[in-house]
Amino acid sequence: MNAETVTAVCAVVIAVASLVVSVYQTHAMRQHNRHAVHPILQLHRGWPPGGRAGIRLINSGLGPAVIVGSTLTVDDEVLGAWNHPVSTTSETACRCAHPL
C-alpha cells in the first residue's frame, strides 16, 4: 500500500466515525428535549384559620398538563368531580364545592 491509499482509508474511517457520533448526538439531543418539556404537577393543600379548605394543583414544569378528569373521594365514597376551576394571581386553583 502506498501513502495515498492509507490516507484515503483513514479519511473514510474518520468520516464514518464522525457520522456515527453525529447520529448518536442527534438522538441524545432529541431524547433530552423530549424529557425537558414534561409537565410537573404539584398538589398543595391548605386550610387557613377561619377559611375554607382547598386543594391547589400547580403545573411547575415546562410542558402543558392536560387534566382529563377528576373525582373527589372521601372514605371510599365518591363525592363528585372538581369541574369548577378558580383563577388566582398566576396559578389555577381547584376548590371543592362539596361540604366535608
Image (cartoon, grey):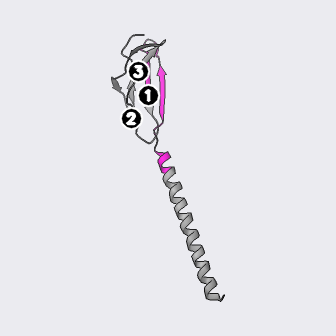
Q: Which residue is mark 1?
A: 57
Q: Which mark is residue 66?
A: 2
The residue that mark 3 highlights is: 71
Q: Is residue 48 magenta?
A: yes
Element under label 1?
strand
Tell me where residue 13 sits by quadrant: bottom right
Magenta highlight on residue 84: no
* Mark 2 residue element: loop
**Magenta segment boundaries in residue numbering:** 32-56
Q: Residue at x 38, y 27 (%)?
A: 69
Whether tag 3 and tag 1 are in contact, CB under 8 A, the answer is no
- Quarter of the image where the C terminus is located: top left
Residue with the most extreme left position? 84
Please give left or right for residue 8 compared with residue 72 in the image. right
The quadrant of the picture occupied by the N terminus is bottom right
Q: Hey, which residue is sitting farthest front in the picture?
A: 1
